[in-house]
Each structure stands twice: as structure tokens, then as C-alpha cells.
Image (cartoon, helix red, strand yellow):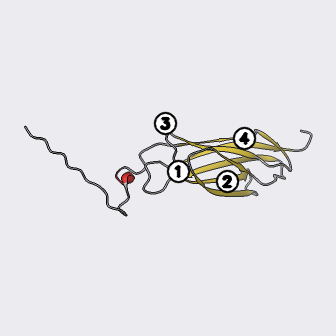
Amino acid sequence: PRSSIKIQTAEPGEGGANASYPGTVETSVSVEGDDRVTSGEEQTVVVEVQVAGDARPQGRLTVVFTRQGGDYREERTMTYTGRPVVVRSSSLGQNGRYLATATFDAPDDAVWQDSQGQFAFQVVGKGS
């Protein structure tokens, strides 16, 4: 008996190797930082996009710092290349609860799924 195999390749501009299965690999976003920051200081968070195995997802990463109550918002957008990144806020002057939200957006033709992670922290007065 004979067997035959049909091989189909993508031509340049047709989406490449990932075009057949975009968005199939689950990702998660880890955001870590200090639980408490003194008023007038910056918050530094470490953001990492994680997948099963040792792959390094690539895409766009947006980190947004917000204050509960809505009167503070700071956004940073960067290219994510598969390694943890350090993101620093500007000086946080008002006491209260804040949230650092990191959103990973994969390219449309990539195998990676978009994902989001959050980290809550408190800004406290000096001496607290």
C-alpha cells in the first residue's frame, strides 16, 4: 500500500507558521511590587508574561497605575520580548489604595493569547 502526504507552505505575507493556530497558547501575567509605598515615593513593579514550558512570548505590554477613586492614572506601554521588565511609577503623592494592571497583547498572527494581571498596594503617609 502507498501513502501520500500533502505539504502546504505559506507564502511570504500569508501570516507565516503561526497563522494556522493564532491565540492557542495560554499566557498569564505576573505583577509584583511592594505592598506599601511611602507618600511621595515611586512604586516599582516587576512584570512577567508566563507560559508553560520555556517559550518566551512577545508582544505589547501596557502597565497602568491607578488610584482607587479614579483621580490618578498613569500608563506605560512597551514592547515585551519574553523577559521580566521593571516598571516604575512617578511619585505617588496621595495616600490610598492603588492598583498596577499589566496587559499583554500578542500580535494578531501569534500563537499567544492576550492576558492581564493586577497588583494592589497602599500608599501611606510618612511615619506610618
The type of residue carrying mark 2 is Val
Cβ atoms under marks 4 and 3 closer than 8 Å: no
- Residues packed near mark 2 inside 10 Å, few (<14), some (14 to 19) or many (20 plus): some
The type of residue carrying mark 3 is Ala
Q: Residue at x 74, y 46 (%)?
A: 44
Question: Quick check: 46 above or below 62?
Answer: above
The type of residue carrying mark 1 is Gln
Residue located beneath label 3 in the image: 52
The type of residue carrying mark 4 is Gly
Instruction: Work out whether mark 4 precedes mark 3 in sequence or the reverse, and give the earlier one.
Output: 4
Q: Nearer the viewer, mark 1 or mark 4?
A: 1
Which of the two residues, 108 or 39, is positioned nearer the viewer here?
108
Where residue 89 sits in the image (x, y, percent)?
Answer: 75, 52
Where residue 97 sits in the image (x, y, percent)?
Answer: 76, 45
Residue located beneath label 1 in the image: 58
- From the viewer's perspective, is 4 left or right of 120? left
Q: Nearer the viewer, mark 4 or mark 3?
A: 3
Residue 100 is marked as none
Instruction: Work out whether mark 1 precedes mark 2 in sequence or the reverse, and give the earlier one.
Output: 1
Instruction: Work out whether mark 2 precedes mark 3 in sequence or the reverse, and give the earlier one.
Output: 3
Q: Secondary structure at mark 3?
A: loop
Q: Residue at x 23, y 50 (%)?
A: 7
- Residues packed near mark 4 inside 10 Å, few (<14), some (14 to 19) or many (20 plus): some
3D distance between C-alphas at marks 2 and 3: 26 Å
Q: Secondary structure at mark 4?
A: loop
Residue located beneath label 2 in the image: 64
Where residue 47 sits in the image (x, y, percent)?
Answer: 64, 44
Residue furthest toward the right?
127
Residue located beneath label 4 in the image: 33
3D distance between C-alphas at marks 1 and 4: 22 Å
